Amino acid sequence: MSSPATILAAPDVTTLRVGILYTGGTFGMVDRGDGLHPRSGIDDEITEVVEDFAAATGIDVVVRYTEFDDVIDSANADPATACRIAARVRADLGSTAPDGVIVIHGTDTMAYAGARIAFELHDVEVPVVLTGAQIPLGHVGSDARDNLFLALNSIAAQPGPGTFIAFGTALHPAVRASKRSCDGYDGFATLCELTPPAARPAIPAPRDLRETPAPVGLFAVFPGVDIDLLDAALRIYHGGVVLECYGSGTMPLDGGRTVEAIRRATRRGTPVVVITHCDSGAVDLGRYQPGRAMLEAGVIGGADLTRETALAKLAYLTGLGLTGSELHRWMTTNLLGEISNSLAHQ
Ligand code: ASP
């Protein structure tokens, strides 16, 4: 694991214009007797926290606050949710030109959403900072207020463009972050240092698609995995599958059935991206025989992409209409710092 970016203390700014979009999550939840539920209408509480931040820092904060009509537990997020958030942020940026935007989001899928938002908003010039909480606002021991302070302070520290997760004591680059604790105040980790490309590649413009993009999914291997299950996943998520393998990219070959299932999928046009379940290191498909067999069956090596970012990037690029060798090239190109430069397509 790598250390996250340090947030500059006491930034030299006197005014801050911030958009805050509340989408749900524990941050604003309430217990109605049967467990925590999302709650809407937290604008007064947010105003109070922002006023406290302004008083503590001496920064004059101007906030434009909005909420989703249907605030959710982020466990209910679907692939469209992050795109919807990105579209809302983009629309708000156009109309209000803030110094940055804060998205309050559930922590369970925050890293997935953050990665997707990072690709969707790769051309945006201000920071987009996701935050949330392990304990709801106003509850004993809540981290909601501190995390919102951190998000505001992160924008005041002017980290430059990009999508980040502000949580606990750290600001994590979204494309390298992962939730690593269900209850710890520092619930997220930066799995690998952000490695921005020397020059920002010109990400292709969306093709003129007649159909909605096919579903993209994630499949994790485990000892005893039934290859019929993998075969089913490759058919259901025919838009593309991130295959989370062991170590440097291995999995049970099941007497050749694994490679056959993968080859059938890649021939049908379903891209398969291999990542590692390890928190550090990278996929090296040439190292072991199973990896080589998968390479021959047409998989794409996912280098050191995190699970969340691999899924977001594959969905984003296939959503643009990229296929075949072109998809392979862009999937292995370092677009935002999500792949180490030494491992990326040059
Ligand atoms: N289940 C909650 C959510 O992701 C957890 C959280 O926000 O911490 O919406």
Image (cartoon, grey):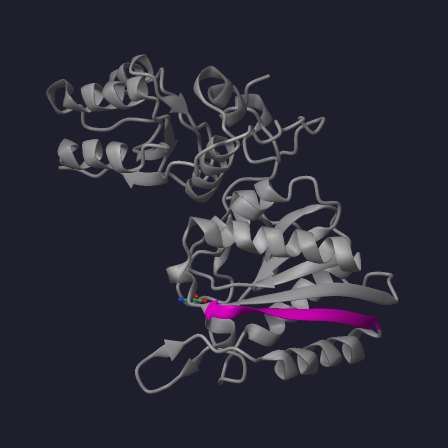
**Position in image of residue 345 (x %, y %):** 55, 19
Residue sitting farthest toward the front: 210
Q: Is residue 167 above or below residue 1?
A: below
Q: Is residue 281 above or below residue 129?
A: above
Residue at image position (51%, 62%) is 186
Residue at image position (61%, 27%) is 204
Residue at image position (65%, 83%) is 44
Is residue 56 toward the left or the right of residue 118 in the image?
A: right
Q: Quadrant of the C terminus?
A: top right
Give the main secondary structure of the magenta stretch. Answer: strand
Instruction: State which quadrant residue 228 falls in.
Output: top left
Number of labels in the image equals: 0
Ligand 1's quadrant is bottom left
Is residue 8 something that shows in the picture? no
**Position in image of residue 212 (x %, y %):** 44, 39
In the image, 281 versus 29, the foreground residue is 29
The region drawn magenta spans: 59-71
Is residue 191 toward the left or the right of residue 145 in the image?
A: left
Residue at image position (74%, 80%) is 51
Residue 157 among those drawn in magenta: no
Instruction: State which quadrant residue 50 falls in.
Output: bottom right
Residue sitting farthest toward the top: 296
Q: Is residue 251 above or below residue 94?
A: above
Is residue 105 toward the left or the right of residue 75 in the image?
A: right
**Position in image of residue 129 (x %, y %):** 64, 57
Residue 67 among those drawn in magenta: yes
**Position in image of residue 155 (x %, y %):** 73, 58
Q: Is residue 173 above or below residue 154?
A: above
